[in-house]
Image: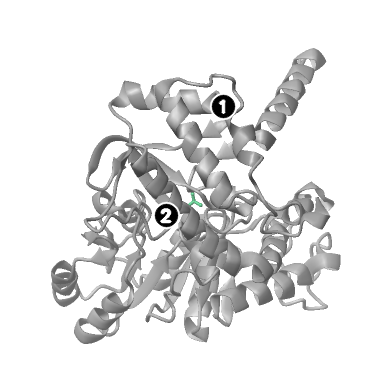
Amino acid sequence: MTDIRELRKVVDRFRAQERKAAAAVNLVPSENKLSPLAQMPLSTDYYNRYFFNDRLDPGFWQFRGGQEVAEIETELARGHLSRLARAPYVNERPISGLSAMMMAMAGLGGKPGGTVVSIDAASGGHYATADMARRLGFESATVPVVRGRVDEQRLRQVLCERAPELVYLDLQNSRHELEVSRVAELIEAHSPHTLLHVDCSHTMGLILGAALSNPLDAGAHTMGGSTHKTFPGPHKGVLFTRSPELHQRLKDAQFTMLSSHHFGETLALGLAAAEFRHFGKAYAEQVIANARLFGKLLAADGFDVTTDENGHATSTHQLWVRIGDAEQTDRFSESLYDHGIRVNVQVDLPGLPGPVLRLGVNELTFLGGREAAVHALAEEFGHARVGARRDGQGSRRVREQYGPPFYFAEFS
Ligand SMILES: Cc1ncc(COP(=O)(O)O)c(C=O)c1O
């Protein structure tokens, strides 16, 4: 039997942790925050509803719960996402990046036994992609990426020898923008029937905010990914294309692979996209400026920040910082956590064996962090390293420096 006192304790715990989370500074590059407006649909009745009738066919209202707000998905979400990506065809139904990946591969990978090429996980590709291809019945081949550039020799070889159905570029761990146009050129030259998909889960917000170039302009046939990393949306996924035929292929795959597309979250995505049309460009530029400044400040303070020969730490939202061995890194992470500053430790970043901090300033920026906040954050890192100021107030000092957020605060 459930004891109500036990449940009260759980609720108290949630409430206490909510207060902490609301005061925290989160530097996990694969996470972001929903704006108050985008958050709203998640606590409405629509969270509970299915919505299938996306053609708004008057004779097809088999599930009626979503009927009154249907066009928030079919017009608002699709319309704003479409304009942000400059892609007339949008599929807003995947429920995450991996869900979008599965649909893209199933829809574009051709017949079983064909080859899907992805980025070698050891050079920054997503850990699941090659195995996903195999589980869907395809052969998998991988290509390395160095500093955002696909190894041309290896790609040329794979294109000539395997004539793959699909090149699926899934760069996850990268401080560099992915160079897409050269890949498109090589495909055109050596295997013109091959489709090119760019999974820009991590950099979605930077691309839709036009701070990084749009893979569709660079020759990708389709692109997509998560909507909750640099894009400040709900945990969802999206797929874009300029081709009606490829859109239909993606739609067919989605129809079989997904029934509940999480209607409440899809409405949240629509509102997040509408706000992003207003704030996205300034936000995306500020993310990159903040990441660069943070790298510079940490390096100047003696932190081991990964940089190129020219001293550049990043051209994206990600910054990689080595603290020491596993114990030292864990101690450092814990010490920041005690201050309300949450970092991400990775052990498999390309070329960096062992534990490394993979930091992202996307959420901090979305909430209003600019140069002053980044300076305050760098100071907190310095304190944590030497064990100074153990007052648990680090995140408060950083948040005090926040300016206006990159969303409509009037809905708070
Ligand atoms: C390229 C790429 N694809 C897919 C995913 C998985 O996304 P999700 O966690 O939303 O399923 C990620 C996550 O980092 C990613 O970087």
Please, is residue 383 above or below residue 202 in the view? above
Structural distance between the alpha carbons of marks 1 and 2: 23 Å
Say if residue 236 shows up in the picture.
Answer: yes
Residue type at numbered disc 2: Arg
Q: Nearer the viewer, residue 11 or 70?
A: 11
Marks 1,2: beta carbons within 8 A: no
Which label is found at residue 86? none
Residue type at numbered disc 1: His
x, y percent for residue 84 = 59, 74
Say if residue 333 shows up in the picture.
Answer: no
Residue corresponding to mark 2 = 292
Where residue 397 sits, quadrant-wise, is top right
User: Label 1's element?
Assistant: loop
In the visual, does 330 lie left or right of 157?
Answer: right
Q: Nearer the viewer, residue 98 or 227?
A: 227
Identify the residue at horizontal 45%, vertical 69% (top origin).
Answer: 212
Residue corresponding to mark 1 = 339
Identify the residue at horizontal 36%, vertical 60% (top origin).
Answer: 170
Q: Nearer the viewer, residue 202 or 376?
A: 376
Please, is residue 112 above or below residue 214 in the view? above
In the visual, does 187 lie left or right of 255?
Answer: left
